[in-house]
Amino acid sequence: MTIPASWFLTLAAVLFGVGAFGLLTRRSALIMFMCIELMLNAVNLTFVTFSRSLHDVAGQASVFFVMVVAAAEVTVGLAIVVAVFRRRRSAGVDDLSELKG
Amino acid sequence: MIAATYAIPDLLVFIAAAAMVLVGAVGVISFRNPVHSAISLILTLLGVAVAFVEQEAHFLAAVQVIVYAGAIVVLFLFVIMFLGIDEREDVSVEPLIGQRPLAYASVLVTVGGILAMLSRGGWVTGAQTVTGPTEVMNGTTPDNVMAVGQSVFTTYLFAFEATAALLIIAVVGAVLLARRERVTEEGVEVA
Amino acid sequence: MKTVATLIPLLPLLGFLSILLLPARSGSDRPGWIATSAVGGSFVATVITFIWLLGQDSREYTVSLFDWLTSGPLHVQAALLVDPLSITMCLFVTGISTLIHLYSIGYMHGEKDFRKFFLYLNLFVFSMLVLVLGSSMLVTFVGWEGVGVCSYWLVSYYFTKDAAASAGKKAFIYNRVGDVGLLAAMFLIFNHFGSLDYLAVLSQASSVPMSSIAVLLIVLALLLAASGKSAQIPLFNWLPDAMEGPTPVSALIHAATMVTAGVYLLVRMSPILDLSSSGRATIAVIGAATAFVAATVATSQKDIKKVLAFSTVSQIGYMVMAVGSGAYVAAIFLMVAHAFFKALLFLGSGSVIHALDGEQDLRRMGGLQKFLPITFPTFLIGWLAIAGIPPFAGFWAKGDVLSKVYEYSKPLWLLGLLTAVLTAYYMSRLFVLTFRGTERFREVTHGHDPHESPWVMTVPLVILSVLSALGGLLNLPWVHGTSLAGFLAPLLGEHESSVSHGTEFLLSSADAVAAIVGLILAFNVWRSTSPWPRYESKFFESVWRWDDAYDATIGRPAQRLAHFGSDVVEPRVLDGAVHGVAGTVLRSAEGVRKLQTGYVRHYGLAVVIGTAFTILFLIARSW
């Protein structure tokens, strides 16, 4: 018997949760990006699990595209972090609160 | 019990993958040093790759390692090293009031709720093989890479081209954003 | 005949419209002549209709103009009812109006708003005719309101003067209170009879079963309406104030026509009045009380027009008392006679005021006998008529009323007799102070002699004096059939008097004696007028402090309420509510604003919390 899909889905859910928690809790922009990567990976795992259970390649194609977009996103995001860091010498997101109401 | 119902190798691989994923994830969010977090991230990504292999998504496993672990994390490390943003963050103190408890609560509710819904909903439901099979026969062997390739280059061709354009835009944007200004500034370490 | 009858109210309306629409040339008397000819034409039409009616068998004729209202069970026609009562009213209304219009051309000559005066006066005559000729209560109500509003406009004719503007308002407001009574009566009558048409309602008045309370309520409501319009207790205070209007207005509206509208209404509704003996008793008492109170007040007034105003209130009190006693014909007779001599007295006083360049205070008149050769004798006749000296009109009319009241209630008759003494007294006082005695007006006229009025003013005086002298012939007590009583009999019924001829003769003598007593009293007191007799009751002069009482009980509390409204309710409640809404929005916005902290992590937390809630909702829904 192969490992049932539910186990993988649970694993993905927990990974997602950990990533979300880290996103909310850490103050460094870089760490927050890494947490976002964790969440994206959880999603990828979920897609692949469904793809295998339903014998449909669409899930895997989706993961393909998610990875592309994640790469692009990290590129641009880190460029922004670099630009911000050059000005402020600090990468803590709590300091970027000028848009407060 | 479990050993009787599931094949031992599968089980062991799953456990290993799960352990890697979870340990890496917790590490990412716990380490104070961003470099250590990046290394933990690699561990997680590799764990996910192993899970992909177990799910017979061979192509994606390879791409996972190459793109994620090989490129994205490297990019992270480059930025950390070049700009020296490796200050240690004090994780024990939380300046925003109520953030941590609320984060715990909401994340737990979210994850718990998702799992509850999934379990009640029968985990996986849906039509089988709507878009295409996960493995296409290459001669006599079932081939996942070919299946994915066929799918991406025929059914999802437009999305593929669009992501190509997206990548170019991202690169151009990144170069523009991270450019150093002409005027010499003080206090910036020349990278 | 339908056309001629329609012309009666139509001509004054056309007069009004033509004065309104024709270009106004200042200084021109043309509007006055247009108005006078319009009303004169109306009088001619009335006479023609009257003569025609005499020749008819049935004395009721409805001229239907158009279907006015249909609403559920209510069907109202815009129609005129030509019957003895309405034609009688029309005759003296149009006749006296024509004379007063003619008089006004002279009196108002040179006034700035000459055209406006005749505009309103014609509109007034139109409204009064609609009131009197209406075939249903609703049509009468239109005229009722019309005369009220025209009265307001004409009383406040000199509106730049504070007193005049206030008087206009007072007149209108008191009228309005009375209108509530008329509306209530209309509602009750429609409720019980299903119609507002006079012929329909009055013919079945005695056959429809009604509780005595219901009838009493209707009668009291009608009494309230009549009190407002005809200036009886408790709504009479507006009439003396209404003397602020020009004298022709006082003569027409507040002596001869509008103030008789209340009595007309009561007489018209007499079949219903007959159903409630307590209602009629109330009417009689109110009438008697008003007559007495007003007569006492008139004895102490210093203004010539105010004496006449209170005299009007008193005489109408007589009419109302007659109505309450069931003597409807007598009431109408007195109404007609009173219209003659009261209009005469007012126009005469107008002539005096005109001669003295606007002076109205009795203390500055006197000895005008030799300067006003036409005004003096005509005024004399009017004075004798109202005092009740035989053989002038007032003696017969008042005698008719008093003898019917004697049959109804002896105490009320006694009060009426006492009032007759007072009437003779104060009218004689007025006469003596104005025309005889020493000349006290030299200051006012700067030493010049007063001059008599032009012919447009004296001709009406002469005509009215002839009518006042001979008016008694309308309804001599021993004549039946060709008298007013005979004319009105198909409508108001024959009244067999229950007193013997001997008693009647005694009563008439008592009336004459009362009049002469009052006369002699006045001459004695006022013969030597150089030292003004020191005793003149302040209580009477201040109208038994009636106005002050109303002010204290109604006026001031209402003002306090209004101030409360404007100082407390408006800023705190109304503005408070509006500002409160604005303030709440502001404060809540301020509160909500605090959600925008600027921290990305807070926003992320918000997203996750939202996700958590969404998932909880989905779980709860599918459970």
Image: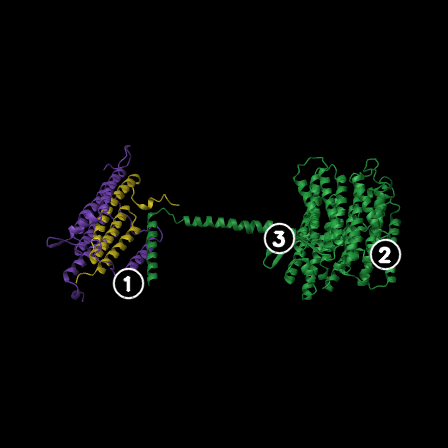
Which residue is nearer to you in this view: B28 or C223?
A: C223
Residue shown at 79% from the left, 54% from the top = C334
Residue at x 71%, y 40% (from the top left corner): C34
> What's the amino acid at mark 3?
Trp
Instruction: Name the residue that disc number 3 marks.
Output: C68
Give the color of chain C as drawn.
green
Badge 1 amino acid: Arg
Residue in view at x 10 percent, y 54 percent: B140
Q: Which chain carries label 3?
A: C
Residue C492 coordinates in the image, percent (x, y): 75, 59
Where residue C457 appears, as percent x and y from the top left, is: 79, 41
Q: Name the residue under label 1.
A: B120
Q: Is mark 3 on a helix, strand or loop?
A: strand
Which comes sooner in the sequence, label 2 or label 3? 3
Amino acid type shown at disc 2: Asp
Query: What kind of element bears circle 1?
Result: helix
- Tint applied to chain B in the drawing: purple
**Distance (Cα) linking label 1 and label 2:** 112 Å
Residue B152 falls left or right of residue C282: left
Name the tint of chain A in the rendering.
yellow
Chain under callout 1:
B
